[in-house]
Amino acid sequence: MTEENPFEIALKQLDDCAEILKLDHDIHETLRHPMRELHVTIPVRMDNGKTRVFQGFRVQYNNARGPTKGGIRFHPQETIDTVRALAAWMTWKCSLLDLPLGGGKGGVICNPKELSVGELERLSRGYIKEIWEFIGPNKDVPAPDVYTTAQTMAWMMDEYSKITGSNGFSCITGKPICAGGSCGRDDATARGGMYTIREAAKEAGINLKNATVAIQGYGNAGRHAAFLCKELLGANVVAVSDSKGGIYNKNGLTIENVCACKAETGSVVNSPDTQAISNNELLELDVDILIAAALENAITKDNASKIKAKILAELANGSTTPEADAILYENGVHVIPDFLCNAGGVTVSYFEMVQNASMYYWNLEEVHERLAHKMSSAYYTVLDTAKKYNVNMRKAAYVVAVNRVVETMKLRGWI
Ligand code: GLU
C-alpha cells in the first residue's frame, strides 16, 4: 500500500472492517469496487479566446440505501483514485448518519485560483453538460466540496434546469438560500463537527470552557470552526494554518483579525499579534483539541506519535492514514473519524433535499436542532460500538456503516 493513495487507504479501512465483521468474501469484494464511474472532458472557452480542455470525474460508489450523494471538488491535484476514495467515504458517511442516501463524489482537475469568474462559470456549466444524464434527485445529487461554493452550485443547478427544461433545484445541494438552498448549510460541516466534539469532550474528560484548540486548514470548514469553537463550545482557538503556514498566540487568536488578514492577503500568516509557526508545528502543539480541516493525509506515521492533543477531530476527509491511526489509538488520542466528524455538511444537504421535495423551508433553529440530534446520536452509536468491539472509533464507525449497507444489499437481493 502506498501511504498517500486515498483509495488504497479507503480499501485498507474496509478490509479491516471486513475482518472484524467476518464479512462474506463476495460481499466484501463487491464493496471494494465503485458501482459506476464517469470520466469526462470539458472544453472551456478561456478569456483569451482559446479553448482549454479540462478533465472531470463522477463516481457513484454504492446506491443500495438511496440515490448517491457527495460533493464536487475543483483541485489541481485531483485524481480518479481520490474521487473513488471520497465516494466510498460518502457511502459510509450517509449510512452512519442513517440518511436514505448512497455515496458518490465528483472532481475536476483545475486550479480555481488561476481561473477568472467567467471561466469558472463556463467550467461549472460544462461539467454539468457532460454529466447531467447521470445525476438527478433519484439518481445522484452533487454538492460543494474543496474549492466549490454555493455560487458554483447555483451555476450547475441553472445549467441542469436549462438542459432539462424544468426547475432543477433538487438536482444539487449547497445552493444559495434564494435559489433553493437550506438555512444553515454554509457552516454545517463545522457545526456538525462541534456537536461531536461536545460529546467527545465528555468522554475524554475535557472541560471545554477555555480548552485550547488548534485548527489545520482555513477553508470553509476550518474558518467556520474557528468561530464556532468559541460560540458553541466556549473553547479558545490558539493556532490556525492554511497552505502558506500557521499562526499561534498562546492567549488565543482574534478570529475576526485572522479572517480580515486572509481576505486581504490570501493567507492567515501575518495576522496581527501572532507568532508564525509551520503546519507541522501546529499539528504537534500541546492543545486539548486538534481539528484537521485541510486535505487528505495530514497525519501520517511520521507525525502521529508527536500529536499531543487529547481529541483529534477530523473535519477533512481522509486526514489520517491507517498507520497513523494505530499510533494514535495506542497513545490514547480520542479520534472523531472523518466520516462522523464532518457529516454535518451532507446531513444538512439531505435536509435541503427534503425541503426541495416538499417545497416547504425550515428556519435556522429547526436545522440546527435536527443537525445536533443527528450528530450526537451518530457519535454515541460509534462510541458504543467501539466499546463493544474493543476497537478504535474509525473501525467502529465502519462497522456500523458497512453493516447497514450490507444488510440493505442482502434484502434487495443483490448478494
Ligand atoms: N462535500 C461534503 C462531504 O464531503 C458534503 C457532501 C454533500 O453535501 O453531499 O461530506
Image (cartoon, rainbow, N blue to C red):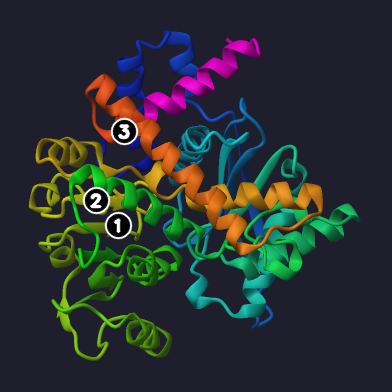
Which numbered tag is attached to residue 292? 1
**Type of the residue with mark 1:** Ala
- Regarding residue 108, the answer to whether it shows in the image is no
* Residue 306 higher or lower than 24, as above or below: below
Mark 3 vs ligand 1: CB under 8 Å?
A: no
Q: Secondary structure at mark 2?
A: strand
| Image position of 114 (left or right of 237) | right
Query: How many numbered callouts?
Result: 3
- Sequence-wise, which precedes: disc 3 or disc 1? 1
> Label 2: which residue?
312
Which residue is drawn at the image coordinates 23% and 26% (left, top)? 391
Q: Is residue 401 magenta?
A: yes
Dot 1 surroundings within 10 Å: few (below 14), some, or many (20 or more)? many
Which residue is drawn at the image coordinates 16% and 42% (left, top)? 328
Q: Is residue 22 magenta?
A: no
Magenta-drawn segment: 398-415
Q: Quadrant of residue 24?
A: top left
Look at the magenta stretch and give its main secondary structure: helix
| Closer-to-camera residue (195/247) | 195
Q: Quadrant of the N terminus?
A: top left
Q: Position of residue 351 (x, y in %)?
A: 64, 49
Q: Secondary structure at mark 3?
A: helix
- Sequence-wise, which precedes: disc 3 or disc 2? 2
> Label 3: which residue?
383
CB atoms of marks 2 and 1 within 8 Å: yes
| Image position of 371 (left or right of 126) | left
Q: Position of residue 237 (x, y in %)?
A: 25, 71
Tag nearer the camera, 3 or 1: 3
* Residue 100 higher or lower than 113, as above or below: above
**Type of the residue with mark 3:** Leu
Which residue is drawn at the image coordinates 26% and 54% (left, top)? 298
